[in-house]
């Protein structure tokens, strides 16, 4: 096995890992904020991919240029989900944990069904975007332009999330995370913080969806492929930790690629879960978790 | 509620005069529908295939029940003649492409919908559970397009498969390699096998590896991957490193899309791709990969261009197009049409829906190929329920259309053969 292949596969794993990280970031944010695991997270990704597809089909607007549009749309969807479902679920007086799980789980089933109803079960894809089917070659290393761009956009999104956490809203977010009952005493509108948190979480996965749509297929169940990895990534990085999601995402991408290269492609998920179990045994709160 | 009450009342009345002529006359006036179950993935990752299957089966039921006068067996319409013009009624169940769900759904069709037989099921993994449950309840399972050879080696006496298996298919691939090598002087010296790791892919790859060895062709890579994986980039790298004459994938649609794109992204253009059907013949695949799909070869058991020898094809295809957004019949949908035709023919010859009579009639099946839309010699089952007269073809996607390229005597276009160039 030549070094070129190893470098190539490692770079590919890194780029995919950045996408995993961004998908996980939104999940981690919401969980860290209010202890709610969003089981419909993969479906938000799917919605973003279909939104990109539909806009591209109807207006010809390139996926890359749709980033702000779809991010804003997903922000709205995130806020709507919080206001319409999660806020109500949080208000339940008994069996709160179960209710929260079932409400997002039910939402995920609903969204998959709705997508199949609206778009059919066929696999869709955007094959004529600016980035589609182009590669960048550096000697023996060939990388798809669409994935390089996706990796860069993911890094920028992480930088933006880091900036947000330094703003006044970011501090309110942090405070609400620390003690959601106490913040009301110092004049923070908890409901508003929560709904914006959901908005940002959904917008983050929306950005990942736009970038994925330019090189991945789109189908009602596409979210499932990424959701499982996102849950592992969040748990690996530590619940609620932005840096954790980034590091864990990259780690998962690399481990997946290396397992496929050196052991067996059909065992690549085992590589991911082996790392996960290892971290759980040695450091149960995750790499950067504070819980 | 009112409806149920009335029905049970009627049932009671009928039972009361069961021996009388009244009931017999009522039966003759309108023969009861023959209920046939169909288990397909209607949601989930393989839903597009299930959707097409639903349309194909409903189309064949319409041909049998209605009056379309299609030049093939039971194509004259008007229901099943030996059962007083009884109509075929289909009941669909959703397997979600999960063997467990397929099993419970098949059981529900048998015990609650009282189907006389089940047709299914696209993926071989779901066919394993469905065929076993059918065997337990002793009703026939007609395997329309499951291709894993192991299915007919389970020792099930209620399993019938008109379609060739991956053994026949793979054999024809290697026959093709030998023939095209001789014809062009540029033989296949090496292959790279890549397959999903369920019953279908694993079985297919095993046979291909064995046949390659027998033909003296080197297997430079034999890659197994998990279906519906988020990325096939590493797998593509491995194929690129192997750089075999022919890449031989056994993949479902989503993975087929990823694989072809990943090979392109890795800067790898294989000289030839010869696919084990499945995802590589899904119209959604070609839509997704665009020009990258040009030149892909696949085994097939259906040849849409064999219109001279199979006069029913144009009419059946036109009817299918009208119902499925202009899509042509393909290797899967054509075999689904044929599976229902074979079953209906057996029910008609049995003259009853009693399971043992139906089983005997299926075993005595003898349909000449020109009475179907398939390019096969005919349909005759051996002791394992496998059709012995189904012969596959090799096709190539040229300028957006499938052309039969092998066997040469039925070919409608010469193969675009880049191996050795």
Image: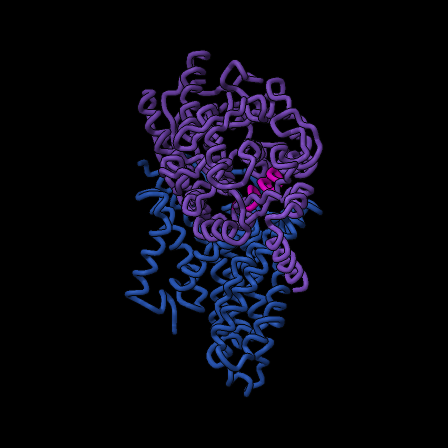
x and y percentages locating residue A176 in the rendered image = 51, 78
Q: Residue at x 44, y 47 (%)?
A: B137
Region of the chain picked out in magenta, as a range? B46-58
Where, quadrant-wise, is the C terminus of chain B in this rendering?
A: top left
Q: Inspect the magenta stretch and tell me whether residue B55 lies in it.
A: yes
Q: For chain B, give the colour.
A: purple
Q: Residue at x 69, y 42 (%)?
A: B29
x and y percentages locating residue B208 in the rendered image = 37, 29
Where, quadrant-wise, is the N terminus of chain B in this rendering?
A: bottom right
* Location of residue A145 with respect to B276 vertically, above or below: below
Q: For chain A, give the colour.
A: blue
Q: Nearer the viewer, residue B81 or B44?
A: B81
Q: How many marks?
A: 0
x and y percentages locating residue B26 in the rendered image = 67, 45
Would residue B261 appear left or right of A65 to someone viewing this image?
Answer: left
Identity of the residue furthest to the bottom in this view: A185
């Amino acid at each position: 096995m030549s070094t070129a292949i190893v470098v190539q596969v490692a770079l590919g794993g890194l780029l995919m890992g950045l996408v995993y990280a961004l998908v996980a970031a939104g999940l981690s944010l919401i969980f860290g904020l209010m202890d709610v695991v969003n089981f419909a997270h993969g479906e938000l990704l799917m919605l973003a991919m279909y939104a990109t597809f539909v806009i591209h089909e109807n207006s010809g607007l390139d996926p890359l240029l749709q980033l702000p549009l779809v991010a804003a749309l997903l922000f709205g969807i995130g806020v709507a989900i919080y206001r319409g479902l999660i806020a109500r679920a949080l208000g339940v007086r008994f069996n709160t944990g179960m209710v929260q799980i079932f409400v997002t789980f039910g939402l995920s089933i609903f969204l998959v069904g709705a997508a199949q109803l609206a778009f059919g079960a066929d696999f869709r894809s955007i094959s004529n975007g600016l980035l589609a089917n182009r590669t960048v070659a550096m000697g023996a290393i060939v990388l798809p332009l669409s994935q390089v761009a996706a990796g860069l956009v993911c890094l920028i999104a992480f930088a933006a999330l880091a900036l947000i956490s330094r703003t006044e809203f970011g501090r309110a977010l942090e405070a609400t995370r620390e003690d959601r009952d106490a913040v009301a005493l110092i004049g923070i509108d908890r409901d508003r913080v929560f709904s914006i948190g959901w908005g940002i979480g959904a917008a983050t996965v929306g950005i990942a969806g736009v970038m994925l749509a330019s090189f991945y297929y789109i189908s009602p169940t596409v979210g499932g492929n990424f959701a499982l990895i996102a849950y592992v990534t969040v748990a690996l990085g530590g619940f609620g930790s932005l840096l954790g999601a980034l590091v864990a995402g990259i780690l998962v991408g690399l481990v997946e690629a290396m397992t496929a290269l050196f052991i067996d492609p059909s065992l690549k998920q085992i590589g991911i879960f082996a790392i996960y179990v290892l971290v759980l045994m040695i450091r149960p709160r995750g790499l950067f978790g504070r819980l | 509620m009112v409806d149920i009450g009335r029905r049970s009342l009627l049932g009671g009345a009928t039972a009361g005069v069961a021996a009388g002529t009244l009931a017999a006359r009522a039966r003759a006036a309108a023969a009861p529908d023959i209920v046939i179950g169909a288990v397909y993935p209607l949601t989930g990752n393989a839903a597009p295939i299930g959707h097409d299957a639903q349309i194909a089966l409903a189309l064949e039921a319409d041909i049998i029940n209605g009056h379309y006068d299609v030049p093939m067996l039971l194509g004259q319409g008007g229901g099943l003649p030996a059962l007083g013009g009884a109509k075929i009624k289909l009941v669909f169940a959703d397997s979600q492409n999960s063997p467990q769900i397929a099993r419970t759904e098949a059981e529900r069709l048998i015990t609650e919908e009282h189907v006389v037989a089940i047709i299914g099921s696209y993926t071989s993994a779901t066919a394993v559970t469905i065929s076993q449950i059918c065997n337990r309840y002793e009703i026939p399972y007609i395997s329309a397009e499951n291709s894993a050879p192991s299915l007919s080696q389970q020792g099930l006496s209620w399993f019938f498969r008109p379609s060739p298996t991956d053994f026949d298919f793979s054999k024809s691939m290697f026959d093709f390699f030998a023939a095209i090598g001789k014809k062009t002087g540029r033989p296949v010296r090496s292959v790279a096998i890549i397959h999903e790791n369920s019953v279908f892919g694993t079985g297919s790859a095993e046979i291909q590896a064995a046949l390659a060895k027998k033909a003296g062709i080197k297997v430079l890579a034999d890659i197994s991957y998990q279906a519906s994986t988020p990325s096939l980039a590493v797998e593509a790298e491995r194929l690129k490193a192997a750089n075999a004459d022919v890449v031989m994938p056994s993949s479902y649609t989503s993975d087929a899309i990823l694989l072809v794109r990943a090979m392109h992204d890795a800067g790898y253009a294989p000289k030839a791709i010869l696919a084990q059907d499945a995802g590589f013949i899904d119209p959604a695949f070609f839509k997704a990969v665009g020009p990258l799909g040009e030149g892909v070869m696949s085994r097939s058991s259906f040849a849409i261009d064999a219109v001279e020898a199979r006069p029913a094809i144009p009419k059946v295809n036109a009817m299918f197009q009208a119902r499925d957004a202009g899509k042509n019949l393909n290797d899967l949908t054509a075999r689904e049409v044929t599976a229902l035709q074979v079953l209906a023919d057996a029910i008609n010859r049995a003259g009853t829906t009693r399971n043992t009579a139906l089983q005997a009639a299926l075993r005595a099946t003898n349909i000449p190929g020109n009475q179907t839309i398939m390019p096969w010699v005919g349909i005759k089952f051996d002791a394992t329920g496998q059709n012995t007269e189904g012969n596959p073809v090799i096709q190539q996607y040229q300028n957006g259309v499938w052309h039969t390229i092998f066997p040469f005597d039925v070919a409608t276009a010469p193969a675009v053969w880049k191996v050795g160039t």
